[in-house]
């Protein structure tokens, strides 16, 4: 697992949530295996991975809805492995918001404060503040059925934040929203999180959400944290084949390993030399097959110094760009995706094209075939 440099410089008092070697099994299935994680105070941490990878299990272990089979969970330095949910001082927003349908908006928001025995005057003041922050002023007397999807989400978030939690847990809270509202709510939640400085752990399988919202991300697969780092590093320097193929769009080109020069390796795509980071290729012999992962924006049509040629299979107009799908003999993936600015001349289907590679951020791993 690769992690960011922050872990080596952070002080213990900066850590809001810590998992030490946590494992959770359901029968014979290991949902989470030996998870080590530090979430820093005020940080927006995203748990990203495909369905069933273990990200929600991890969130539920922090929340206290599940208890680990091995390992320990800490919140604000206190051991909470066996502490029930209501004593952990956390706020949770679920996928379906879980609002009480018979209660007004104000009473939904006030519920956690009443359960904690907060004085009535303070409840009224804190609920009013929470509704104002969430742009819900004037909606306190409505019932959940009278709210739009975005408003219902804001109520759920207000209810989670009004108790002033040590940690805010978000379990795919945008999944029920349409695309435009989803984008708007992403911006709002990030602004609120920054304004309040609340430590946040966010679960999603949506890469765009993770890349745009996170201070750091934990990429999870088959119950293991594969890479823990900033969105920029995970996008540009994936730790392994899974992360490289899961994050963003990449085409895979078949190449042969040539040599290593310090931190840089050279691979050959036909007669063309491409430089990639050397770490994933350490120990390989010259001539061994490798797979080069390239982003669509790293590829361009050219009239000379082409890395490979192919024929256009499809050209898909996307508004500000055109996605060009190319059948090429060097492709290890089904087709190569080239992203062209919409202002460029787009070749016709079946037309032969020459493609060059801009080597920045290309990365190679030993071939699995």
Image (tube, rainbow, N blue to C red):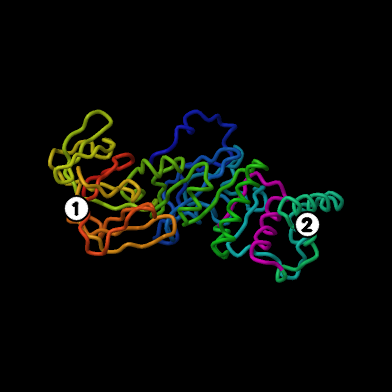
Dot 2: element: loop
Classify mark 2: residues with Cα within 10 Å, few (<14), some (14-19) or many (20+): some
- Which x, y percent locates residue 240? 32, 45
Point out residue 117 in the picture as x, y percentages from the top left corner: 80, 52
> Mark 1 highlights which residue?
309
Front residue of this view, candidates 300 and 368 = 300
Q: Is residue 53 left or right of residue 94?
A: left
Q: Is residue 149 left or right of residue 102?
A: left
**Does the magenta segment cover residue 303?**
no
Mark 2 or mark 1: which comes first in sequence? 2
The residue shown at (50%, 28%) is 9
Which residue lies at the image location 77% right of the left edge and 62% below the top edge? 139
Kindly indicate whether the residue at mark 1 contacts the one at mark 2 (C-beta within 8 angstroms).
no
Magenta stretch bounds: 147-171
Q: Residue at (25%, 37%) from the top-left corner?
A: 275
Work out whether residue 158 or residue 335 is closer to the camera in this orientation and state it: 335
Say if 311 sits above or below 359 in the image.
below
- In percent of width and height, residue 273 lies at 19, 39
Could you tell me residue 136's position as x and y percent?
A: 74, 57
**Which numbered mark, 2 or 1, is in the foreground of this view?**
1
Q: Say if the magenta span includes residue 162.
A: yes
């Amino acid at each position: 697992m690769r992690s960011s440099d922050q872990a080596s410089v952070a002080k213990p008092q900066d850590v809001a949530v810590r998992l030490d070697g946590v494992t959770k099994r359901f029968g014979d299935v290991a949902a989470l295996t030996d998870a080590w994680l530090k979430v820093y105070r005020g940080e927006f941490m995203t748990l990203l991975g495909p369905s069933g990878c273990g990200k929600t299990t991890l969130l539920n272990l922090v929340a206290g809805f599940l208890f680990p089979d091995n390992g320990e969970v800490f919140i604000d330095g206190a051991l909470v492995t066996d502490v029930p949910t209501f004593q952990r001082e956390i706020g949770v927003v679920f996928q379906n918001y879980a609002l009480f349908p018979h209660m007004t908006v104000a009473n939904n928001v006030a519920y956690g404060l009443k359960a904690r025995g907060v004085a009535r005057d303070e409840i009224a003041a804190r609920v009013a503040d929470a509704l104002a922050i969430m742009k819900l002023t004037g909606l306190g007397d409505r019932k959940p059925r009278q709210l739009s999807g975005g408003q219902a989400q804001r109520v759920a978030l207000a209810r989670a934040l009004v108790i002033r939690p040590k940690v805010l847990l978000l379990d795919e809270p945008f999944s029920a929203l349409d695309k435009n509202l989803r984008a708007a709510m992403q911006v709002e939640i990030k602004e609120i999180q920054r304004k309040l400085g609340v430590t946040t752990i966010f679960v999603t399988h949506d890469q765009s959400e993770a890349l745009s919202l996170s201070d750091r991300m934990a990429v999870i697969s088959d119950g293991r944290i594969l890479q823990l780092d900033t969105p920029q590093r995970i996008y540009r320097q994936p730790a392994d084949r899974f992360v490289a193929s899961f994050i963003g769009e990449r085409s895979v080109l078949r190449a042969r390993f040539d040599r290593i020069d310090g931190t840089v390796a050279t691979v050959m795509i036909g007669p063309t030399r491409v430089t990639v980071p050397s770490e994933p290729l350490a120990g390989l012999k010259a001539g061994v097959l490798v797979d080069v992962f390239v982003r669509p924006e790293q590829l361009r049509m050219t009239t000379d110094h082409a890395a490979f040629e192919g024929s256009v299979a499809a050209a898909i107009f996307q508004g500000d760009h055109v996605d060009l799908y190319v059948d090429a003999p060097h492709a290890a993936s089904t087709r190569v995706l080239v992203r062209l600015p919409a202002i460029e001349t787009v070749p016709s289907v079946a037309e032969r094209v020459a493609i060059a590679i801009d080597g920045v951020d290309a990365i190679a791993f030993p071939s699995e075939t």
